[in-house]
Image (cartoon, grey):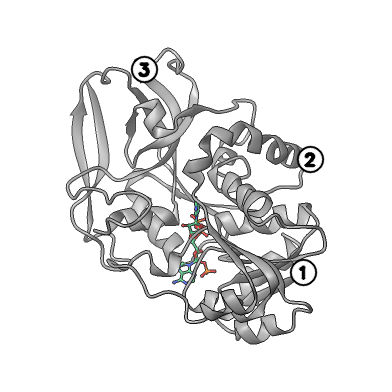
Amino acid sequence: MTSNRYWRLDRHPDGLNFSEAFSLQEETLGPVAPNAVRVRTQYLSMDAGTRMWMTPRTDGYQPPLPLGGKMTGLCLGRIAESDDARFPVGALARGFGQWADFADMIPDVAGLELVDESIPDVRQHFGALGMNAWTAYAGVKEVLGAQPGEWLAVSAAAGATGSLVCQIGKLLGARVIGIAGGAEKCRYLRAQLGVDVAIDYKNENVEAALAGIEGGVHAYFENVGGAILDAVLPNMAHYGRIAICGLVSSYDADAAQAGPARFDQILMRRLRVEGFFIPDFLHRGPEFLQPLRRWYDAGQLQMRFEEFTGLEATLEAYAAMMSGRNIGKVIVRVHD
Ligand SMILES: NC(=O)c1ccc[n+]([C@@H]2O[C@H](COP(=O)([O-])OP(=O)(O)OC[C@H]3O[C@@H](n4cnc5c(N)ncnc54)[C@H](OP(=O)(O)O)[C@@H]3O)[C@@H](O)[C@H]2O)c1
């Protein structure tokens, strides 16, 4: 018998008010179910996309989480029990489990995979070698096809996904424009990530700043939507490409949001716009990992972490990420 604490979704959160929506519960776990694997969580990944699962929306890329159910998210930890021979007890693994001491997963449903134990900082499996890195790589390389010398812009540029987009864009030879909230984030983008242009959307007019980009933006990696997308659209180069990775500015809405006000620019500038979702690419993980690992080993790909301690700190960590208090990746250390 194993004692387990987990975060339960009791009601749909209103904005950032997560403490009214979730409660920390305790239970006693029996043996792991047939074909399942139980991971003792070491780290939890705080991901903006999971905010939509907390709403009642049924038209998202994932069905909403049922009220009264355990909160789901990416977990990293050691396998404590296993009924799947591919996943031996003691191995380090990452997958979509629960915000809990112990995450139970059916491996093929949860995208569970064993990760390389030789990486000294295991957090990098949520960083330079994690899902955000796969997302950044797939978006920049495959969806946008960013070319050397082109202007590549990205929103939420100082966050987990965005900071990797900036670095991968530079490594592929693009000229990178990072859009982020606040002077400190913009300094980080310039000084640490080497972007060519950083725009502070909280204190600058994004549309006016982008108007100075000679020839326009060739490739745009969208993480935010709303007003930022409206500022970018009229500044795209003709025949430019837009990868819709995320629309975080509207994830806390319980209903679909109105489309971009500057939708006309897609025709006027003959743009190609494509949404993509990394779970569709999970089978290509080993392929994406090769360049990421090479850059990481060469010290060319980095991730800054904002680490919170203890399962009880999870809601605070999540709110910090959703309100933009983070530079880099927000994680929760549950156990050593
Ligand atoms: N398609 C996929 O498969 C996939 C996979 C992973 C991530 N994503 C997307 O990538 C984006 C970033 O996610 P992440 O998990 O890496 O989180 P993150 O960027 O580390 O953190 C979220 C950031 O979003 C920005 N933000 C939050 N609310 C905003 C608002 N109302 N307006 C403008 N900016 C806002 C904040 O930065 P500022 O201070 O700069 O505002 C905040 O730091 C999300 O849209 C997420 O859905 C998509």
Residue 218 in picture, x, y percent from top left? 71, 68
**Quadrant of the image for the N terminus?**
top left
| Placement of 314 over or under 254, stated as above or below | above
Residue 62 in picture, x, y percent from top left? 35, 49
In this view, the residue in front, 208 or 315, is: 208
Q: Secondary structure at mark 1?
A: loop
In this view, the residue in front, 312 or 265, is: 265
Task: List the residue tagged with mark 3.
Answer: 82
Can residue 13 be seen here? The reply is: yes
| Placement of 27 over or under 140, stated as above or below | above
Specify whether 92 is left or right of 24: right
Residue type, mark 3 in image? Ser
Q: Secondary structure at mark 2?
A: loop
In this view, which residue lies farthest toward the top?
85
Residue at image coords 29%, 55%: 54
Measure how far apart labels 3 and 2 are at the Cα level: 35 Å
Q: Quadrant of residue 75?
A: top left
Classify mark 2 as within 8 Å of ligand 1 or not, answering yes or no.
no
Residue type, mark 2 in image? Ala
Specify whether 56 is left or right of 172: left
Residue at image coords 27%, 40%: 6
Q: Name the N-terminal-most of marks 1 and 2.
A: 1
| Placement of 109 over or under 9, stated as above or below | above
Q: Name the N-terminal-most of marks 3 and 2.
A: 3
> Does the CB distance between marks 1 and 2 fall below 8 Å?
no
Task: List the residue tagged with mark 1.
Answer: 196
Residue 312 in picture, x, y percent from top left? 32, 48
Number of the label disc, if any, that sits on residue 298: 2
Q: Badge 2: few (under 14), some or many (20 or more) residues near its Cα, within 10 Å?
A: few
Measure how far apart labels 1 and 3 are at the Cα level: 48 Å
